[in-house]
Amino acid sequence: MKAELEALARRAVACPRWRWMPGMLRLRDAPGKADHGKREGRVEARDDWSYAEWPCLPDLIDPATLGCLLALVREAWMDPDLSIARERGAGWIVAVHLCDALLSRNRYTRGATEAEALVAALEAAP
């Protein structure tokens, strides 16, 4: 795993709103060992392991894992319509539409990659 992706995966699992979801792809977190970054498999609904016992990181280039990350961000912001899109030029943007009785506004997080923008949105969630 590239160092940037590993750092991003560590940021994701450090978020208070992070949790493993069925369908996510786990990578072995064993720095300095031959199996570091090796695919462990998909999280299943019946899994009862913990990150502390089986240190793993999410594979943030896996489409299913990114979809689950998007679901976590929507849940964290309580916005089922939250969207992510490629910005003009370079990078990605997550748009959260915040509404209450007095005002309506948008909140944006950005990242160089889709995964980075989603992790930033998860970190910024209330």
Image (tube, rainbow, N blue to C red):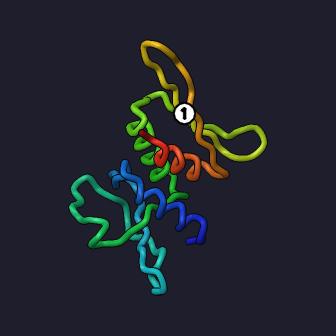
Would you identify the image quadrant in which residue 80 lies?
top left
Looking at the picture, does residue 97 appear above or below residue 72?
Answer: above
Badge 1 marks a residue whose secondary structure is strand
Which residue extends farthest front?
Answer: 102
Farthest residue to the bottom: give it. 33
Amino acid under label 1?
Ser
Q: Camera-side residue: 124 or 115?
A: 124
Residue plotted at (50% across, 16% down): 103
Residue 93 position (above or below residue 99): below
Callout 1: few (<14), some (14-19), or many (20+) C-alpha neighbours within 10 Å?
A: some
| Residue at 43% over, 35% down | 77
Estimate the x, y position of residue 63 in percent, counting from the top left: 51, 51
x and y percentages locating residue 23 in the rendered image: 37, 53
Q: Nearer the viewer, residue 41 or 28?
A: 28
Q: Mark 1 = which residue?
A: 83
Task: State which quarter of the image contains the C terminus.
Answer: top left
